[in-house]
Image (cartoon, grey):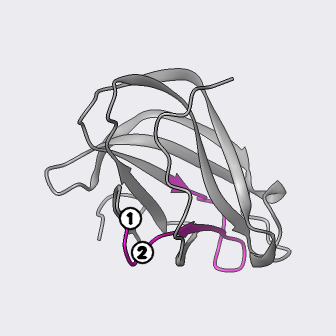
């Protein structure tokens, strides 16, 4: 069983719809150096939707805390089997084939994308948009080229 190093599991007050070129990220800063083996996101798919393969990755961040560069580590899950409809929201785990060594006190971003989805076939990720205490959420509407 994996050791839980970072988590934020209370206070969700918003959600982000992820599909096609619309990607979403959440930053985090490890207190301790460790290897990240998996990421869990609190999500659901649109009712009856088929978002396809969802990629969850970790990227470095720039000086403004926005994702930059290539994925440091990534994994996928079948978005078509994610909880069906907003009332079914639940934790979905993505396990990385090869764990990645994170450095303490360095900001990283979890990036989620469902490139074959569309507005009716999206993954929706719950978040704390009003008062995030451990990181910030930023979105991209051009497949991660720029982050808002």
Extreme left residue here?
63
Q: Judge whether 60 appears above or below 118 on screen.
A: above
Identify the residue at image location x=70%, y=54%.
91
Q: In this view, does 68 lie to the left or right of 63?
A: right
Identify the residue at image location x=47%, y=63%.
23
Q: Quadrant of residue 143?
A: bottom left
Q: In this view, does 15 lie to the left or right of 110?
A: right
Disc number lying in front (2 or 1): 2
Q: Is mark 2 on a helix, strand or loop?
A: loop
The disc label shown at residue 17, or none: none
The residue labelled by disc 2 is 129
> Magenta residues?
112-132
Q: Judge whether 145 appears above or below 126 on screen.
A: above
Q: How many marks?
A: 2
Q: Can residue 19 be seen in this view?
A: no
Q: Is mark 1 on a helix, strand or loop?
A: strand
Extreme front residue here?
10
Q: Judge whether 70 appears above or below 84 on screen.
A: above
Q: x, y (%) of residue 44?
A: 72, 66
Q: x, y (%) of residue 70?
A: 36, 39
Name the foreground residue: 65 vs 52. 65
Give how far apart the Cα atoms at labels 2 and 1 are.
Answer: 7 Å
Q: x, y (%) of residue 131?
A: 37, 73
CB atoms of marks 2 and 1 within 8 Å: yes
Identify the residue at image location x=74%, y=56%.
79
Q: In which quarter of the image is the N terminus?
A: top right
- Residue 124 lies within the magenta run: yes
The disc label shown at residue 137, or none: 1
- Residue 76 lies within the magenta run: no
Q: x, y (%) of residue 122?
A: 67, 70
Identify the residue at image location x=64%, y=52%.
54
Q: Quadrant of the C terminus?
A: bottom left
């Amino acid at each position: 069983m994996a050791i839980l190093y970072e988590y934020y599991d209370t206070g969700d007050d918003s959600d982000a719809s992820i599909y096609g070129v619309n990607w979403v990220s959440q930053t985090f800063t490890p207190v301790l150096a460790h290897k990240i083996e998996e990421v869990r996101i609190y999500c659901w798919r649109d009712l009856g939707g088929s978002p396809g393969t969802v990629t969850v990755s970790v990227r470095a961040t720039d000086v403004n805390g926005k994702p930059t560069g290539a994925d440091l580590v990534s994994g996928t899950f079948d978005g078509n089997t994610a909880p069906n409809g907003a009332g079914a929201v639940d934790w979905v785990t993505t396990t990385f084939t090869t764990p990645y060594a994170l450095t303490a006190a360095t900001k990283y971003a979890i990036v989620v994308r469902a490139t074959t989805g569309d507005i009716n076939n999206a993954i929706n990720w719950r978040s704390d948009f009003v008062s995030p205490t451990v990181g910030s959420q930023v979105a991209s509407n051009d497949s991660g080229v720029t982050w808002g």
